Amino acid sequence: MMRPFMRCIDVNSEQCPCLLSDTNHCFMCSQLKGEAVCNCDWTGQCILHEKRWKAPRKPSDAPCRREVESTLVIKRQVNEHTYIVETEVGLELAEQLNKIGSFIFMRRVDDPEMCNFPVGIMNVKRGTLTMAIETIGPKSSRLFMPLEARVLLRGPYLNGVFGQPWIDSTKYGTILAAVGGLGQSNALMLAKAILANGNKATFVIAPGQAGSIFVADELQAMGVEVISVSSMRREGFAKLQELFSDKVDLLLSAGPDDLHNGLIATMHESGYNFPMAVTNNATMCCGEGICGSCAKKTKDGVWIRTCKVQLDFNQLENSH
Amino acid sequence: MIKVVIIGGGWGGCAAALSAAQAGATVLLLERTDLLLGTGLVGGIFRNNGRFTAAEEIISLGGQDLIATMDQSARHTNIEFPGHRHASLYDVGKIEAAVSELLQQHGIKVRLKTRITDVLRLGKLVRHIVTDNGEIIEGDVFIDATGTAGPMGNCLTYGNGCSMCALRCPAFGPRVSITARAQVKERNGEKLDGTFGAMSGSCKLHKESLSSALQDQLESTGVVVIPMPEMLKNKISLGKKACSQYALPEYRDNLVLLDTGHAKMMTSYFALEDLRQIPGLENARFADPYAGGKGNSIRYLGIAPCANTLQVDGVDNLFCCGEKFGIMVGHTEAVATGLLAGHNAVRYSLDMQYLQLPRTLAIGEFIAFVHEQMNEKQHLDVRYTFAGATFFNRMQELNLYSIDPSVIKARVAEAGLSDIFSQRLV
Ligand SMILES: Cc1cc2nc3c(=O)[nH]c(=O)nc-3n(C[C@H](O)[C@H](O)[C@H](O)COP(=O)(O)OP(=O)(O)OC[C@H]3O[C@@H](n4cnc5c(N)ncnc54)[C@H](O)[C@@H]3O)c2cc1C
Ligand SMILES: Cc1cc2nc3c(=O)[nH]c(=O)nc-3n(C[C@H](O)[C@H](O)[C@H](O)COP(=O)(O)OP(=O)(O)OC[C@H]3O[C@@H](n4cnc5c(N)ncnc54)[C@H](O)[C@@H]3O)c2cc1C
Ligand code: FES
């Protein structure tokens, strides 16, 4: 049996204790939740102590992520709406973003704050970020007018993948991944992390909405076995089903929630229940646990802000 | 085979492990740090005042091995210090290894560095417990012996912050209450001013940091009493002490040191620069807590509501002992309740009637009285111990205090309970 877990992604970082602790909305520390005594799940530091230690502080001094100005350089246009871009952010922020599930909030320099939207980090090389961006609505479309825009990037944000503890703890194992559409932008970081732990990895990739497969060569060069399919539903799930066995230690799903749920259904159909890590597709606005746009309900009826909370996807109400 | 799982390896947990093993169960004892005995690593005083009676009762009831281990590890026996007679002091440097070996001889499996952070409770039963790295541990019956000391947030909110005591929460992760995780509402002890918790009444100095004259006196007699310099008297607050038995004027007017291997100092904490003004302590250093100049650990947060059989209210297969059972202080007290909890855990598994100790015994009276005071009288600001204050007075009034082992043995026999904790039930 697997233990459900919930943990703030920002605990032990320079962001912690964050604004939520000012109003007893921290969900890690019982006393910073408003309870009278300690009943915490150890995180490696006492958040209450950090809070007192740093207090008193003005709200304006609250820990804030770095904002970096840079130029977006289009490296490749994958289809009519999807671009692979690169941008220089300096070594420090780039290194902080060199993790699975990392993302930044981005907008054009002259755009108001409300235009910020989350973009996942596809790869990091010496201070340069690679990202894949699909222009689907007003915020993302603004970026490419003019084509090589000056942008503001705010980060690091780290909760782009649920179930990270499974990834960290799987060593010298066998890992399968289903990757669909823009979910490909998570594939390289995932592969880096799992290969570094000595795992064997097979990624089944479908073009999905993005209409093309753009990470296969790079994954193969890293040592991942890649199976490209034209459709995950029609072809991919069956391929994965053939690979399911007692030897599989972890299943990854990078793509929309439909992909996650389809994969879970396929897995159950085959009589397996592997631990899973999946991409976080919540609609995010602030990334700080404040605005509430990313809130989702768990099966236990608790509302959590998914920009901050690490959990297992199947703890969420609308998961299978 | 009946499997008893005990969480917390303080004196309470060790005693529960022993009686459960003696009753014939398979026993697994889980401790979050790398040492057994919990706060017992920094205590040492036993057989003082009514604890003598309780120790002899424990021996007659069949728990003699633990008392024998304390006796064998004693640096000093039958000493006196203000308000306390016929005390023994065990050596805090030796006792842990001795207890560890004893448990091994009884076939008890001890797992150190194993911290429980979750409990699966279904209806009236604990199904399993979970370690902080996700391992599931199953058992027929569980004993919450996690104590009430710390963790850091409580020491911060109700004391002066983490002072780095023997429990080493930052290193091993904080205490987690099994009862609370089983969704049982706990109670909290209070200070006289109504705030939660209480601070330990003593701390330890490195004996080597004292003047050689003080060291010699400590080693030969076990006790040093130094009159407190006038200007330091008002700096000592008796009201915050966990140990009401030392909340006496003698402890404000004097600095009392006892030889437990370290120099046990009978005040909660003392600013180092003040302490060093006392003759002989010019170079003094704290051994436990390391930051004894600023504070001490806070205890009595998270007491389990339970019956006099030590079964936790509302959960059939969960028992508790030591400080989890009530606002009590002491190694002897933790051992007495631990033995009962371990024994009754086995009775639970065999569907036998639980043992309840009669009030003709000091231990039976202690358990019943503590519950009455906490439940009916709502007295949450008093700490109970055989060694002094309220309960020792009561022992004397009720004629339960005795220092004659044969009298105590006869009482236990009269209750029909001789060697009950060493009898096999399985
Ligand atoms: C952690 C994270 C990482 C992301 N990484 C990338 C990335 O690398 N590249 C990229 O192009 N996009 C990424 N997104 C999605 C991206 O942020 C949204 O597509 C964007 O906010 C849409 O803004 P908009 O104004 O352009 O469109 P809107 O008008 O806001 O939305 C247009 C359509 O997209 C849907 N949508 C909105 N937000 C999301 C979302 N978060 N996920 C999926 N669909 C959404 C809406 O329901 C609507 O149908 C990521 C989102 C998150 C939460
Ligand atoms: C500084 C000090 C001096 C004292 N001096 C004396 C003295 O001289 N004489 C005397 O009789 N009494 C003394 N006492 C009191 C006495 O030590 C205690 O009342 C008694 O030992 C409590 O025993 P316990 O087993 O209930 O709890 P504890 O000793 O607190 O033991 C609890 C154990 O459980 C472990 N634990 C907690 N949570 C978990 C978890 N989730 N998973 C696994 N393990 C866990 C802890 O690490 C600890 O080892 C002193 C106390 C202190 C603090
Ligand atoms: S995005 Fe604002 S609360 Fe999560």
Image (spheres, coloured by chain):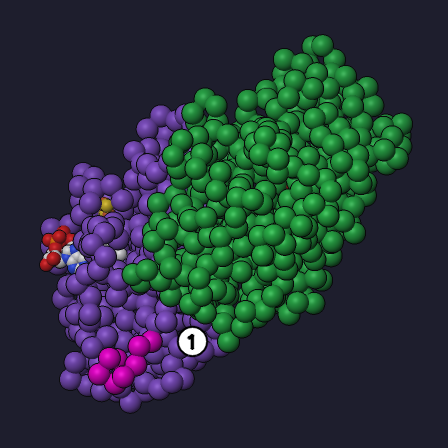
Chain colours: A purple, B green
Residue positioned 31% across, 52% down in the render: A309
Residue occupying the point 73% across, 46% down: B405
For the point 21% across and 42% down, the residue is A291
Mainly helix, strand or loop, the magenta region? loop
A258 sits to left or right of A122: left
Q: Is residue A268 magenta?
A: yes
- B141 vs B330: above or below: below
> Is B289 placed left or right of A61 in the picture?
right
Q: Is residue A221 visible?
A: no
Residue occupying the far front of the picture: B414
Chain holding disc 1: A
Please tell me which residue lies in front, A27 or B66.
B66
Judge left or right: residue A9 versus residue B328. Answer: left
Q: Position of residue A174 (x, y in %)?
A: 41, 80
Q: Amino acid at mark 1?
A: Met
Residue toward you, B386 or A9? B386
B57 above or below B252?
below
| Viewer-closest of B62 and B273 | B62
Q: Position of residue A265 (x, y in %)?
A: 20, 77
**In-image side of A149 versus B79 (left or right):** left
- Tell me where residue B204 appears, x and y as whole percent: 71, 35
Residue that carries the numbered disc 1 in the rendered image: A222
Q: Residues within 10 Å of mark 1 (few under 14, many from 20)?
A: few
- Does the magenta run of residues contain A7? no
Secondary structure of the residue carrying tag 1 is helix
Q: Over which residues does the magenta segment extend?
A: A267-274
Asked if B332 appears above or below B124 in the picture, the reply is: above
